[in-house]
Amino acid sequence: MFVVAEWLYLDGASRAPQPLPDNFVHAEWIALHDNPNFRGFVDFLRAQFDRIDPIDGSVPRLFRRAVALELSFFETAYTDGT
């Protein structure tokens, strides 16, 4: 679910401390994910997601699974492998 990743990125970037970090890569990632155009894109994705009729209850389950996978991705990326 694309909406999960983009929504989480928007949320994280919008909480970034100001001023932006000196590290160019970090500052660019924040700027990419915290601006009116990206916010509009995420709003669009969320509106599309909200249109889905969860007849069988699979949408909430899939949403939670996508969040868990995204969390696992970052936990794995930021561990030293031990």
Image (cartoon, grey):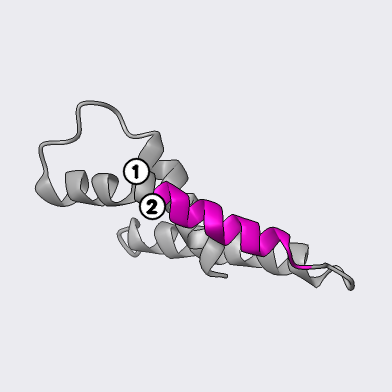
The magenta stretch is: 38-52
Q: Quadrant of the N terminus?
A: bottom right
Quadrant location, the C terminus: bottom left
Q: Position of residue 24 (x, y in %)?
A: 10, 47
Residue drawn at x 63%, y 57% as measured from the top left:
47
- Residue 50: in magenta span: yes
Residue occupying the far right of the picture: 55
Within-10-Å neighbours for mark 1: few <14, some 14–19, many 20+: some
Q: Residue at x 70, y 69 (%)?
A: 62
Label 1: element kind: loop
Residue at image location 80% in from the left, 72% down from the top: 58
Three-letter amino acid code at the position of disc 2: Phe
C-alpha distance separating marks 1 and 2 = 7 Å
Is 30 or 23 nearer to us in this picture? 30
Residue 37: give x, y in percent of width and height. Answer: 36, 50
Look at the image and say whether residue 16 sits in the magenta stretch: no
Left or right? Give the position of 53 relative to 51.
right
Label 2 CA crowd tier, 10 Å (few <14, some 14–19, many 20+): some
Instruction: Name the residue type under label 1.
Output: Asp
Cβ atoms under marks 1 and 2 closer than 8 Å: yes
Q: Is residue 66 left or right of residue 50?
A: left
- Residue visible at 41% across and 59% down? 74
According to the picture, the residue beneath numbered tag 2 turns out to be: 38
Residue 16 appears at what percent x and percent y? 33, 34
**Front position in the image: 45 or 67:** 45
Position above or below: 24 against 49: above
Q: How many marks?
A: 2
- Indicate the position of residue 73 as horizontal and vertical percent values: 44, 65
Residue 30, above or below 16: below
Residue at the outermost top position? 18
Q: Which residue is mark 1?
A: 34
